[in-house]
């Protein structure tokens, strides 16, 4: 997914999550952060989940972004199996508009943290920005790119709404 060394793993519970999680991948791409993208389902591929999460640090990943919807166990189970920081993205579900995903991910019992983001695209983008911010603590070039990304975002905001100009 990226020519850079993959510091970030983006995992998701289903192909259907890609429409949301691609925003995390695109944000990392824009920042020049190497990442790898995989489908890992806590329910349908539990052996794959164990193998991935237990081996993620040895594989060289430094941060994991995990997106899932519905009864979204993927971020929490991943966090239980790895010492790496895990950011959870609640995917917007059809039945409950992602509130099920959000509550499944955010309410971790004390002791196993998942940094939980907003439901949907905003959460996916912000998970990527948080992952980049973590990596930027030890990567001055990335810190500069992150500053530039934020400055560009600020410049795009008009002083007044278009109808008033
Ligand atoms: C979860 O179930 C996935 O993360 C996905 O958001 C949801 C629905 O999956 P599909 O039925 O679309 O494969 O495990």
Image (cartoon, rainbow, N blue to C red):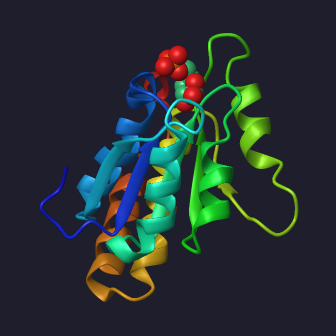
**In the rendered view, does 152 fall on the left or right side of 74?**
left
Would residue 165 be visible to someone looking at this image? Answer: no
Vertical comparison of 108 with 67: above or below: below
* Residue 60 % position (x, y): 33, 75
Residue furthest to the left: 3
Q: Nearer the viewer, residue 27 or 98?
A: 98
Q: Residue at position x 29%, y 58% from top?
A: 35
Q: Quadrant of residue 151?
A: bottom left
Q: Residue at position x 30%, y 77% from top?
A: 142
* Residue 75 % position (x, y): 62, 49
* Residue 34 % position (x, y): 25, 64
Could you tell me how many numbered marks the image carries?
A: 0
Residue furthest to the top: 95
**In the rendered view, does 47 fall on the left or right side of 28?**
right
Q: Residue at position x 21%, y 70% from top?
A: 5
**In the rendered view, does 149 fall on the left or right side of 158?**
left
Q: Quadrant of residue 31?
A: bottom left
Q: Residue at position x 76%, y 27% from top?
A: 100
Ligand 1 rendered quadrant: top right
Q: Nearer the viewer, residue 14 or 102?
A: 14
**In the rendered view, does 25 fall on the left or right side of 124?**
left
Q: Quadrant of the C terminus?
A: top left
Vertical comparison of 148 with 22: above or below: below
Residue furthest to the right: 110
Would residue 42 be visible to someone looking at this image? Answer: yes
* Residue 109 % position (x, y): 87, 57
Q: Nearer the viewer, residue 50 or 131?
A: 50
């Amino acid at each position: 997914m990226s020519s850079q060394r993959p510091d970030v793993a983006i995992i998701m519970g289903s192909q259907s999550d890609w429409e949301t999680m691609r925003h995390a991948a695109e944000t990392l791409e824009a920042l020049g952060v190497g990442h790898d993208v995989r489908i890992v389902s806590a329910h349908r591929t539990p052996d794959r989940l164990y193998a991935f999460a237990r081996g993620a640090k040895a594989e060289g990943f430094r941060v994991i972004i995990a997106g899932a919807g519905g009864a979204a166990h993927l971020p929490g189970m991943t966090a239980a199996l790895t010492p790496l920081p895990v950011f959870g993205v609640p995917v917007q579900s059809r039945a409950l508009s992602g509130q099920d995903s959000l509550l499944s991910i955010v309410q971790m019992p004390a002791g196993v943290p998942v940094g939980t983001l907003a439901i949907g695209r905003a959460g996916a983008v912000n998970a990527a920005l948080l992952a980049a911010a973590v990596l930027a603590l030890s990567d001055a070039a990335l810190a500069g790119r992150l500053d530039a990304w934020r400055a560009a975002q600020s410049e795009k905001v008009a002083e007044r709404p278009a109808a008033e100009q």
